[in-house]
Image (tube, rainbow, N blue to C red):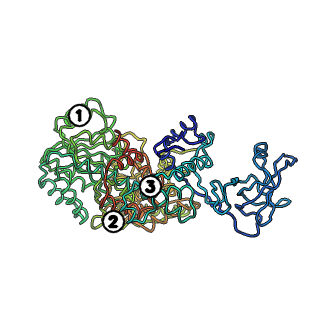
Amino acid sequence: MSKFNLSDGVEILKGIGSHKKEVLKSIGISTLSELLYYFPRRYLDRNLTSSVVLKNGEVVSVLASVLDTYLAHGKTSRLVVGVRTPNNERISLVFFKGVPYFKNVFKAGMDIVVTGKLEYFRGLQIVHPDYEIISSTDDGDGLDLIHTGRIIPLYPSSESLKKEGLDSRGFRRAIKQILDMVKENKLDIGEVLPGKSIQKRKLSDRYTSFFEIHFPSDHDSMQEAKRRFAYEEIYFFHLLMAFKVSQREKIKRKLWPLKESQTANKLVQSLPFQLTKEQENSIQKIRMLQQLDVPMAVLLQGDVGSGKTVTGLILALYYIENNIQVCMVAPTEILARQHYHTIQTLLGYAPFIGVELFLGGEKVKVRREKLARLKNGETLFVIGTHSLFQDDVLFSDLGLVIIDEQHKFGVDQRESLRSKGKNPDILAMTATPIPRSLCLTLYGDLNLVTIKAKPKGRKPIVTKWFFEDKRQSVYNSIKKYIGQGRQCYIVYPLVEESEKLDLKSCIDAYESLSMSEFKDYTMGLLHGKMKANEKDAVMHSFKEGKINILVTTTVVEVGIDVPNATVLVIEHADRFGISQLHQLRGRVGRGEHESFCIFLTPFKVSEEAKVRLESLVEYSDGFQLAEIDMRLRGPGELLGVRQSGLPDFKIADMQKDSELIQQALEDVQEFGELGDLEKIEIKNRFWEGRILFSN
């Protein structure tokens, strides 16, 4: 073939016509390079079987010569191909389908490699084996096989791809063509990683790695190739994050006069608890970033009950006291209302006014008045939900955007809030602990600040797991603690009964329990389908102590703070994930009294549910639990792929490759550069890169 380049289109390959070209384009493959980066999803070891005696039931790959072919008739006609192995064993290859085709494939004297499961039926046979014909140019020692007789790659495919001949065999043929062309033309495919990285991390070169990842010579070489390409992906993602940081640092904003806040100092002194050392350090670290002339971007992550909300409020006061607006967005109305009431209570003495709550469904006149106060600067602190993303929400001088439980919002939503000000600071907060490897990739462009310790005086939450037969004992315990003046949550997975799922619902349970087991107690019902004013009234009554037992759903998962509630019972706990259970558990243990979290489940639960529940009983540290959760579910499920903005890694694994993630970050910081080559690589690899480097 004449000279070619990996940037050439796939249509130069044999067997890739215009239609197949379009099919490949639909999955993001237009060039030879993109096809080489279409990595196998797994491998099959089909190396030649070396055993002298072939045994019934074995899956074997053997070298053989075709002896004869004949049609066998019976209930179903079939083609039988007789072959002989080097050990003089005769095997019958049996084909029930495609008889006319296979009849013309196999000729006497032909050498083949055949793979399949041996069965004994009037002699050894393999039904519908995989096979590969050995060409006359093979010398028998270094067979150039691609479908069997070696470790073979299996590629991601679909029904539409398979219809076009793009199953694993089709991809193997196409990719083998490229590698043969590279080898025959001695093409220098170049290197995209810095030489220092390759040397320091002992990575295989790009040329070798392409051959070994698609057609590995052995398992060790395959693993080395996978390690190299995993590092490569991670390296360029870190480079993308570094570029985003550098772009932000080029933005010079006005220096806000964020001097010491008397209001913040008064707030700290008035708190019913002392700030932890980690809270103080977090405030100090973020305050330093506030003083810079570039926009601040911080992720403040705290374990459940660690006090991140009050930390965020203290930081907000430095803006508000200087007449700079702050916007705080929460994922639920209940949480937004709680933040609003908490802030109103804590700031009752503050020397300024202008705290507003923005929710959906407000009367037109009320909303119009709120929007006017916000636009003219009269409102300094606005708290709300998704309603704040709307185009009519305009600010006079937005200086800080606080995003609570930020992983529950999409990337576009977070950016829409930022665009409402002139390069405002961003403080993203989460009470969902995130594994370190996930933080380094997902939030590599943010300054990470962590609060683990809980305020002094809080006792550990006692966590127990019981089966259905202990239900009455659990109910008796609830009555005992209510008798001591405490309150209780009972959480259900469903609002209403479902015909498809054999689960109790909170509405049915509320009606049943309030007329039977807890008829002598005041019960409340709270779920997401209630109207906003109804939910607000129930939560107010519960916080005031007027409700003994609150029957609810996961609507209370995040942020609800009732210190007198010390018992939490979770029905069908096996149906919840680790993160959700840990968040729910955080609704108790917020005061000075001993608290209890009780999981109730059927006798039979899945093995994975067993691991989840046992982990929660054993561990109270949310960061330990997050690591376990990621091992069980993977990073995509842990945060929600679309919402979290996870990178579209093809081969790197944020769980398994945590060491590579750290190494690649260190290398980018030490000698990473962003030239034209690197920009092209990032653009081709990541969605964000396609936007940043679109020209």
Res. 371 mark: 1
Position of the C terminus by quadrant: top left
Q: CA distance from mark 1 to mark 3?
A: 39 Å
Of labels 1 and 3, the one closer to you: 3
The foreground one among 444 and 319 is: 444
Of labels 2 and 1, the one closer to you: 1
Q: How many marks?
A: 3
For residue 485, which quarter of the picture?
A: bottom left
Could you say whether the residue bearing mark 1 is in a helix, strand or loop?
Answer: helix
Q: Residues within 10 Å of mark 1 (few under 14, many from 20)?
A: some
Q: Which residue is mark 3?
A: 635
Vertical relation: 366 (above or below) 4: above
Of labels 2 and 3, the one closer to you: 3
Kind of residue at disc 1: Leu
Q: Residue at x 57, y 57 (%)?
A: 215
Could you say whether the residue bearing mark 3 is in a helix, strand or loop?
Answer: helix
